[in-house]
Image: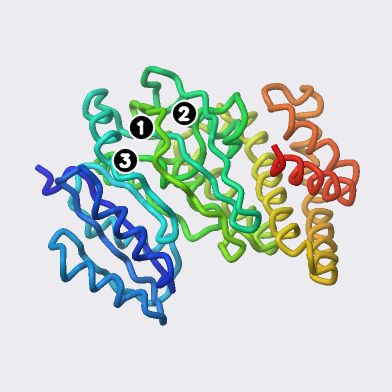
Amino acid sequence: MYKYKVSVIICFFNAESTLETMLKNAVNQTLRDKEIILVNDGSYDQSLKVAQKFAEKYDFIKIINQKNMGISVARNNGFDKSEGEYIVYWDSDDFVENTMLEVLYNRAKADNSDIVCSQFYIYFLARKIKRKSVLPFPNYPITGEEAFKNLLLTVFSSFYKKNFVVGTVWDKLIRRDLIVSNNVKFNDVILEDIVFMLHAFLKAKKVSFVNNYFYTNFQRMGSASSSISVISKVNMSLKVVENLLKEEGLFEKYFEYYKKFYLQLYYYISFKQVYVINWHIKDKLVYKAHKAKLIFVLNEVKNSKEFQNYYGSLKNSRFSELQTLPKMMLKIWNLSSVLYVNFSIFMYKAFLKN
């Protein structure tokens, strides 16, 4: 038996300006049997006081304090203290509609699903522009393996038509027993959400979908994945995924998918750096510095033996199954990192205008 239907895990670090809004969203969820676990990741602002104010008022709120060890450790610690049948992981600086838990939980129970996915909004704070995901959800549950293959193939293209799952955790409800029985943990790597969801999907028996838009994710420049240095760390995340496939005896089976995942993960994280460049568009010196550094790092990546081997393999297969934009961008990148960055900037501006 479980003490709660859902455990909401919210980790925070110096989030005094946004935490109260998120806690109001969590407390006001229409689902009654819930608990909220707040993990203070070594904040030194007034975040803890905000959390304590809510914990004093609501007996279903727990607070965990830890030294600053990062989001992955914080989420794992929060999960270890949870008592819910299902789990959600929300960020402390986002916004959630108050029916999210109830709708996702009811769908999970109706379908007996391990994971339930929902649509979401992305809000680009730099430009004050809001975009909605257009994931073509099936109107029936699918197997975890189907979701796993789809995520390997598409990574994070939430605004295109081929993919129906993305590597985020905040838009999903996940069965506790799935996490426990398969030791699904957040790794201390960049893009930890994608790595976590790949593992979760691989082990899930059934995945369901709801087409509602409950969650708004705010894209901030200061996030961990908004630094150009993360491109150099992507290989660590790829290694975790490679090891997972090898441990499950699936690396050969999914090797062609892994190649596409490898290239598209680099494409996704490098394209995100264009967001950083455009954040500084008014400051010419900073703009030039970011752009030059990005080009340098991209040259290092594309000239690596592994990148060239995988690129050559996919080129020989005419980049089968890849979406048009990643396919085109990878070709441009292989030709010239300078051209790739300039064209990415053009594409980014066009995306924001539409």
Disc 3/disc 2 C-alpha distance (Å): 21 Å
Q: Amino acid at mark 3?
A: Met
Q: Which mark is residue 204?
A: 1
Query: Where does residue 211 sit, x and y in percent of width and height?
Result: 41, 28
Judged from the image, the secondary structure of the residue bearing numbered disc 1 is loop
Residue type, mark 2 in image: Ala
Q: Nearer the viewer's eye, disc 3 or disc 2?
A: 3
Residue 85 percent coordinates (x, y): 20, 42
Q: Position of residue 227 (x, y in %)?
A: 66, 63
Write the residue at 52% across / 54% down.
218
Local crowd size for mark 3, using a 10 Å CA cut-off: few (<14), some (14–19), many (≥20): many
Q: Does dot 2 land on a helix, a strand or a loop?
A: helix
Q: Residues within 10 Å of mark 1 (few under 14, many from 20)?
A: many
Disc with the residue nearer the chain's start (3 vs 2) = 3
Q: Looking at the picture, which amino acid does disc 1 mark? A: Ala
* Label 3 – label 1 distance at C-alpha: 21 Å
- At mark 3, the secondary structure is helix
Q: Is residue 49 above or below residue 108?
A: below
Determine the CA span between mark 2 and mark 1.
Answer: 9 Å
